[in-house]
């Protein structure tokens, strides 16, 4: 959450914080996921959150149930995740060369 009594705009602070939290979580054997699509009013009501705070991001944290394998994106360029018969979760990622602009 962002405290609206401190600043009005939060820029990318919550993204930086969320990434740090997730990297720390992975170091501790946990897994997580950032969620930006949130029913903010409903969540604020459920948490009895003061109006002074704006919900910026939600992070789901927990013990990973499945094995995740990072792999290179194939020649077709498909970045969709998929699971094999054993339930391993395959996550295609673009290479560093593909995402750096020169
Ligand atoms: C700022 C931010 C907000 C996100 N919000 C959502 C969301 O609302 N719903 C969702 O399904 N994934 C959301 N994602 C995507 C997931 O958090 C996650 O990054 C994505 O599934 C890719 O996972 P990976 O980075 O482990 O490959 C968001 C990611 C970021 C960085």
Image (tube, rainbow, N blue to C red):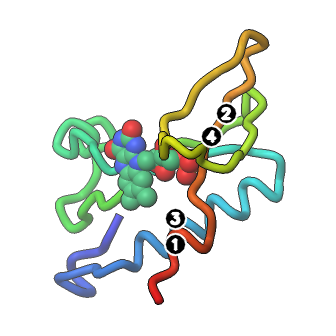
Residue drawn at x 22%, y 39% as measured from the top left: 39
Residue 6 to residue 40: above or below: below
Q: Of the numbered discs in the image, which one, if any, rests on residue 18?
A: 3
Mark 1 is surrounded, within 10 Å at the Cα level, by few (under 14), some (14 to 19) or many (20 or more) other residues, namely few
Residue 13 shows in this picture: yes
Tag 2 and tag 1, C-beta contact below 8 Å: no
In the structure shown, which secondary structural element does the residue marked by tag 1 occupy? helix
Which quadrant does the N terminus fall into? bottom left
Q: Taking 30 as reference, is 36 left or right?
A: left
Q: Earlier in the sequence, mark 2 or mark 1?
A: 1
Q: Taking 15 as reference, is 39 left or right?
A: left
Tell me: is circle 4 under 8 Å from ligand 1: yes
Q: Taking 73 as reference, is 23 left or right?
A: right
Tag 3 and tag 4, C-beta contact below 8 Å: no
CA separation in Å, label 4 and label 1 = 24 Å
Residue drawn at x 59%, y 52% as measured from the top left: 93
In the structure shown, which secondary structural element does the residue marked by tag 2 occupy? strand
Residue drawn at x 56%, y 66% as measured from the top left: 19
Asked whether 35 or 47 is in front, the reply is: 35
Q: Earlier in the sequence, mark 3 or mark 4?
A: 3
**Mark 2, residue position:** 90
List the single residue furthest toward the right: 28
Tag 3 and tag 1, C-beta contact below 8 Å: yes
**Mark 4, residue position:** 91
**Mark 1, residue position:** 17
Res. 50 image quadrant: bottom left
Residue 37 to residue 83: above or below: below
Tell me: is circle 3 under 8 Å from ligand 1: yes
């Amino acid at each position: 959450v962002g405290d609206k009594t401190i600043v009005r705009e939060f820029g990318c602070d919550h993204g930086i914080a969320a990434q740090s939290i997730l990297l720390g979580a992975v170091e501790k054997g946990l897994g997580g996921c950032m969620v930006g699509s949130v029913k903010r009013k409903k969540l604020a009501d459920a948490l009895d959150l003061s109006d002074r705070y704006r919900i910026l991001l939600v992070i789901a944290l927990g013990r990973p149930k499945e094995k995740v394998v990072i792999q290179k994106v194939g020649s077709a360029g498909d970045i969709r995740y998929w699971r094999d018969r054993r339930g391993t979760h395959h996550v295609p990622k673009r290479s560093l060369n593909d995402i750096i602009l020169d």
